Amino acid sequence: MPHHGIDPQALLPPDEPVHLLDPDGTYHEDPEHPVDLKDADLRELYQLMVVTRKVDREAINLQRQGQLGVYASCLGQEAAQVGGAFALGENDWIFPSYREMGAAIVRKVDPSALLHLYRGTWLSDHDPYKHNFALMAIPIGTQALHAAGFAMGAKFDDNPIVVMGYFGDGATSEGDPHEALNFAGVFEAPCIFFVQNNQYAISVPLSKQTHAPTLAHKAVGYGMPGYRVDGNDVLATYAVTRKAVERSRAGEGPALIEALTYRMEAHTTSDDPSRYRTTEEEELARTFDPILRMENFLRARDLWDSDFEQEVDQAAKAEATRVREEIYDAPHGDPLELFEHVYVEPPASYEAQKAQLREELRAGEDA
């Protein structure tokens, strides 16, 4: 007899990922995954992806010019991030990793606020409670625990929100996501675990990360459904995520979504992907470009014209320019601020450490 009356077969992901848009823009209607979006929403999805890519490119340029210490690009993953975040309600929460620029832009987080983290001018410069978008998590997989815990708290408080935690395929090899998935499953927390399977954990391919048939199959072991979706298809990503969100909001517990995509840039600006990927592989990935796919769809629906193209292009350029002006040569704050947001009641050694840093800074000024 199935544990807790759960039918394991009902939790299994489909053999093939859900796919609605072909690369040429041809749309395949799927009654199980309806796209309940108006024409304005479809155009907005496209614009969000274009703005994301333009800001992403500007961030790479800033790093190359010494303005950022490092940056993790989301090039090629715009549909997964934008489509997933777009499916959430206004009061729902997102717990990102370090790559979710697209999800942040959907939630109207100022991109330059996130880039202050990579510049080292502030740990995070946005208000999480204003946007329901948590601080970016650099440690691999820790945000999965934060998302699960927040969702459990919301359930205890009878707060009808859904929480989504983004992480990559590499994080599924870490312990924290395992613990988060297990707790969320046991407590039936309203939490969506959104795995962006971009095929590599830095240089380690997925084939060397897991022996499971797919990452979505891992969900079965935690008593939650596993979904697989073409993560380069923004409409499919939206539809699948929307289905999981509605299920969680109805009190049916957590879910895991595996969005199959491809990281078209390096893991970070400190990485050299040519050491582990071929040019042929990268060229093939470009044929599945999520933005071009959506553009083709809009053209086929007569939702594309030169005015719209110019409007989107100008909006993307303006945002990238604004971000650049905010970050370029942005002043660093007082290093002693590090001590202001750690402990409510500092331990005895805390003041000694603060005094030591103060003396080191003074010595540097006198040198």
Image (cartoon, rainbow, N blue to C red):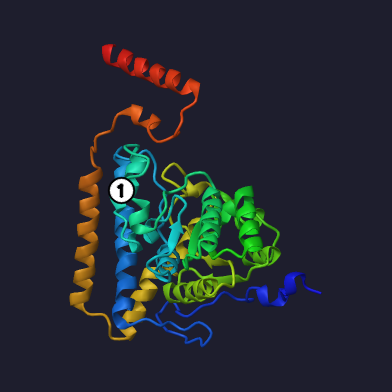
Along the line of sight, the residue nearer the viewer: 33 or 359? 359
- In the image, 352: left or right of 58? right
Rendered image quadrant of residue 357: top left
Which residue sits at x=33%, y=50%?
Answer: 127
Residue found farthest to the front: 157
Which residue sits at x=23%, y=48%?
Answer: 324
Q: Is residue 226 visible?
A: yes
Residue 102: percent from the left, percent from the top?
A: 37, 60
Using the image, determine if residue 34 lies above or below residue 217: below
Residue 286: percent from the left, percent from the top?
A: 43, 65
Residue 317: percent from the left, percent from the top?
A: 22, 59
Along the line of sight, the residue nearer the viewer: 36 or 68? 36
Q: Secondary structure at mark 1?
A: helix
Rendered image quadrant of residue 121: top left
In the rendered image, the quadrant that contains the C terminus is top left
Using the image, determine if residue 319 lies above or below residue 137: below
Write down the residue under mark 1: 113
Using the image, determine if residue 361 lies above or below residue 58: above
- In the image, 236: left or right of 364? right
Residue type at mark 1 is Ala
